[in-house]
Amino acid sequence: MPVPLAAKSAAANESSSRSGLFELTRWLRRRRADLEMSVLALVGKVPNHAVRVGALRFWGANIHPDATVYHGFEVRRAQRLQIGARSSIGNGAILDARGGLTIGTDVNLSTAVHIWTAQHAWDSTDFAYTAAPVTIGDRAWISTRVTILPGCTIGEGAVVAAGAVVAGDVAAFSLVGGVPAKVLAQRPRDLSYKLPRRHAKTWWW
């Protein structure tokens, strides 16, 4: 028995709707990273710590309630970002977590620190994309305008001097500086300080 024309039309419309929804879902998945970066860039300008941390958590970041994230940050792939208790992320930071970024407790990142976990391989014939995780140990201090490249581990209590470029691991409790960063001195190993909690800091900065 022939299928009524109305039934054919309804089936075609349903198929078209499903196809359109599928394409929309695919487009949203492809654009998720762009949308995330755009939203977080805007939220980074909001003068409120709680709002900024809340937005990062919404996109999947694991941030301790006592951590501080100052304004003007840029975060890539928030769901692979982890920040420990009382750690302080200075204003203007770039946190690239595409390859995985773990920041321990009582870590201080000064203004305009750049941490990269993904890049293009300079020696690749096809400009290949590479990624490797970065880990920063407890009570490390990363001073202003430091750049940390993919695959680095910054040891517990280590200090990276202003303007340094870190391209390899930094030993615990060492002071490094320069381009590329080299050991300059040693820090005391009996560190016991704790950075202020987020609620003890200026709420709008």
Image: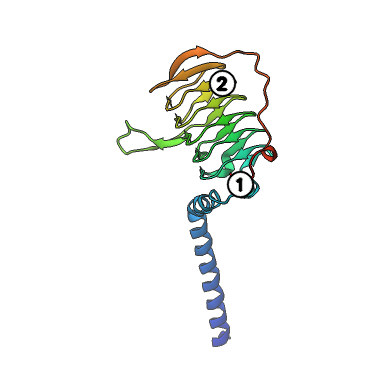
Confirm whether residue 4 shows in the render: no
Q: Nearer the viewer, residue 5 or 159?
A: 159
At a point 51% along the width and 73% down the height, the residue shown is 16
Colour basis: rainbow
Type of amino acid at the residue the image marks with label 2: Gly
At a point 59% along the width and 20% down the height, the residue shown is 157
Residue 182 picture quarter = top left
Horizontal relation, residue 20 to residue 202: left or right: left
* Picture layout, residue 80 above or below residue 54: above
Q: How far is the residue under mark 1 from the one under mark 2? A: 31 Å
Secondary structure of the residue carrying numbered label 1? loop
**Picture coordinates of residue 114 (x, y %)?**
46, 35
Residue 156 picture quarter = top right
Q: Which residue is mark 1?
A: 204
Q: Which residue is mark 2?
A: 155
* Quarter occupied by the N terminus: bottom right
Residue sitting at the far left? 125
At a point 47% along the width and 23% down the height, the residue shown is 161
**Picture coordinates of residue 96 (x, y %)?**
49, 39
Mark 1 vs mark 2, foreground winner is: 1
Type of amino acid at the residue the image marks with label 1: Trp
* Picture layout, residue 126 above or below residue 187: below
